[in-house]
């Protein structure tokens, strides 16, 4: 990544490097993705991403993978649960480009859009929103991802967020409780937790 470029840069200009990364689920299934420089998780699939995929609670018919990077979460959900409608978006153009390439390579149909937080999904609601949040982008961003989630959830829908509990996760959990009035840890592993809030009108 260039000196002034972060993984949440809107339009990365850094020289493009691509590598193949493999995700191994606890059920033994393996998926391959093209990871791009300038996009989160270039060297390998993030531990938090794998934990979320192994232990989140899957329900309903639709899921939004917000801040999808090169698409590991949404694509894996679609492979494991082909009956679900999957939606993904990211602010980083290169991430969106690679999410589209990876969806095609993995033979799945996913609605993939570019934009800031929920801006690409105006007026749309989902049964699940899953997020591996961009903590480095600052609290304004992750707070918006949580604060505006209820507008995009059906009644009974869930927001599921994965984070390192001692590296920002604690504050995220507290904020989910404030916005939803409920939050629980549905999984804890090696410092990583999955927090789940249910939207009840
Ligand atoms: C921690 S990474 C997770 C990427 C991917 N979901 C994964 O698990 O590998 C967070 C993602 O959020 C994206 N992001 C940062 N700010 C954003 C914003 N304002 N709107 C949408 N996505 C954003 C980043 O570009 C990055 O891809």
Image (cartoon, helix red, strand yellow):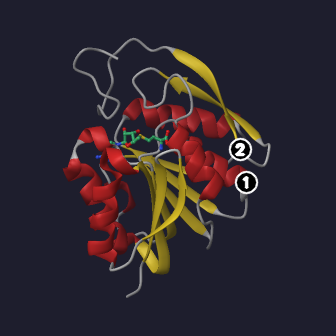
Q: Split into 4 quadrants, where in the image is the C terminus?
A: bottom left
Camera sees residue 109: no
Residue drawn at (65%, 47%) of the image: 76
State the CA–CA distance, disc 2 to disc 1. Answer: 10 Å
Q: Check disc 1 and report its element: helix, strand or loop.
A: helix
On residue 17, the disc is none
Between 73 and 190, the one nearer to me in the picture: 190
The response on whether ligand 1 sits within 8 Å of label 1 is: no
Q: Check disc 2 and report its element: helix, strand or loop.
A: loop
Could you say where residue 24 lies in the image, as x and y percent from the top left?
71, 38
Could you say where residue 94 lies in the image, as x and y percent from the top left?
42, 29
Question: Which residue ends up furthest to the bottom in the rendered image?
Answer: 201
| Mark 2 vs 1, N-terminal side | 2
Residue at the spot of label 1: 80
Which quadrant holds residue 179? bottom left
Q: Split into 4 quadrants, where in the image is the N terminus?
A: top left
Q: How many marks?
A: 2
**Contact check, label 2 and label 1, Cβ < 8 Å:** yes
Between 196 and 38, the one nearer to me in the picture: 196
Residue drawn at (35%, 15%) of the image: 14
Camera sees residue 51: yes
Rendering quadrant holding ligand 1: top left
Mark 1 nearby-residue class (10 Å; few <14, some 14–19, many ≥20):
few
Could you say where residue 110 lies in the image, as x and y percent from the top left?
59, 51
Residue at the spot of label 2: 25
Could you say where residue 104 lies in the image, as x and y percent from the top left?
66, 37
Residue 144 vertical placement versus 180 (above, below): above
Residue drawn at (39%, 70%) of the image: 152
Mark 2 nearby-residue class (10 Å; few <14, some 14–19, many ≥20):
some
């Amino acid at each position: 990544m260039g000196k002034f470029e972060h993984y949440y840069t809107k339009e990365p200009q850094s020289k493009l490097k691509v590598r193949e990364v493999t995700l191994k689920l606890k059920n033994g299934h393996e998926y391959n993705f093209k990871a791009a420089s300038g996009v989160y998780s270039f060297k390998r699939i993030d531990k938090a991403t794998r934990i979320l995929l192994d232990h989140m609670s899957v329900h309903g018919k639709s899921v939004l993978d917000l801040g999808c990077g090169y698409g590991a979460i949404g694509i894996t959900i679609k492979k494991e649960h082909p009956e679900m409608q999957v939606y993904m978006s990211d602010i980083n153009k290169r991430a969106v480009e690679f999410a589209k390439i990876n969806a095609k390579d993995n033979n799945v149909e996913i609605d993939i859009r570019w934009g800031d937080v929920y801006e690409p999904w105006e007026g749309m609601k989902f049964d699940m929103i899953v997020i591996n949040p961009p903590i480095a982008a600052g609290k304004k961003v992750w707070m918006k991802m949580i604060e505006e989630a209820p507008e995009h959830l059906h009644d009974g829908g869930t927001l599921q967020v994965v984070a390192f509990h001692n590296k920002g996760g604690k504050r995220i959990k507290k904020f989910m409780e404030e916005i939803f009035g409920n939050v629980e840890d549905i999984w804890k592993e090696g410092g990583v937790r999955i927090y789940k809030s249910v939207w009840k009108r």
